[in-house]
Amino acid sequence: MALHSGKSSTRAKNKYNARSYDSLHIVVPKGQKVEILAVAEAMGDSLNSYVNKAVNTRIFQSAKIYTIIGGVNGTGKSSFTGALDTRADDLGVVIDVDKITANFNVSPIESGKIALQRIDECFEQGCNLTQETTLAGYRTAATASKAKKLGYYVRLYYIGLDTSDECIRRIANRVARGGHNITDVDVVRRFSLRWESLLKVLPHCNEAKFFDNHNGFIEVAEYRRNKLIIKSDTPPAWIQEFSAFRQKKL
């Protein structure tokens, strides 16, 4: 029984790896493998992890990056950006329409214009930028498309929750602490259209990662080369719903 279970586990792992990863064979000068292994061990990494990090560092050092932090109001986009900023140095200029509205005491329409101006300035200067957005409307998809044409690497971090009621409760808690408010009507409308909005942006992304924020930011799926890969044995209802919605649209 134990042997059978082990074989099943190995088959399941191999199946997951085949679905989730590509294999890359590299050749190095004789003797250098030992040196690389030693460095990886000193860094606390496996050889595979160390090489992956080195490749990603090289890519992002040479690339201009447009990062999108997406999700319906109340899902925790700003908190995610703050957490990401503590361990990433490639976010560049962070643009958040809600914060612009609050800080400059202007209407949402005016703050949207200011945000667009800042995005254009970043594109003109060729600097990295990060935008927090609900993805509602067509604007983010158009911006992502423009970024790709300008040679930017476009990545999306999408934050999800299961219900609009949970989003509304979190916004109420934020307001009670002095934060900005979003009307319930706007939240419900954006929540009901969130998958359509997301599908408009995904084709312009080089990569996308999906995080559940029911109890901290847990990565539950990723999107690469037109494939949505579920990375959790117990995925939340919202990512299952999006996966089914996407399949219907294919």
Image: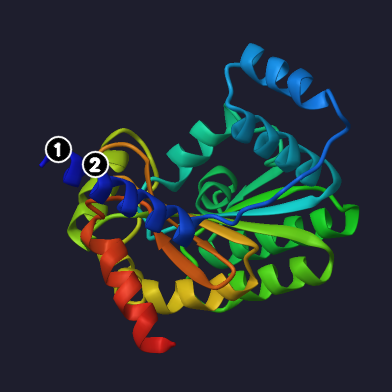
**Does 85 sit left or right of 170 as displayed?**
right
Q: Let me know if residue 185 appears in the view.
A: no
1 and 2 marks in contact (CB < 8 Å): yes
**Does 36 sit left or right of 158 as displayed?**
right
Q: Residues within 10 Å of mark 2 (few under 14, many from 20)?
A: few
Q: Residues within 10 Å of mark 1 (few under 14, many from 20)?
A: few
Quarter holding residue 214? top left
Check disc 2 and give the amino acid type.
Gly
Please tell me which residue lies in front, 217 or 113.
217
- Identify the residue at image location x=32%, y=36%: 216
Q: Name the element at disc 1.
A: helix
Q: Give the CA distance from mark 1 to mark 2.
A: 6 Å
- Identify the residue at image location x=59%, y=23%: 45
Give the residue furthest to the bottom. Answer: 249
- Identify the residue at image location x=74%, y=34%: 54
Circle on res. 6: 2
Give the residue furthest to the left. Answer: 1
Circle on res. 214: none
Q: Name the element at disc 2.
A: helix
Please tell me which residue lies in front, 233 or 111.
233
Circle on res. 2: 1
- Identify the residue at image location x=34%, y=87%: 248
**Does 100 sit left or right of 179 as displayed?**
right
On the rendered image, what quadrant is the N terminus found in?
top left
Q: Position of residue 125 (x, y in %)?
A: 89, 52
Does 191 sit above or below residue 29? below
Q: Let me know if residue 169 appears in the view.
A: yes
Q: Position of residue 6 (x, y in %)?
A: 24, 41
Check disc 1 and give the amino acid type.
Ala
Does 239 sit above or below residue 95? below
**Does 64 sit left or right of 137 as displayed?**
right
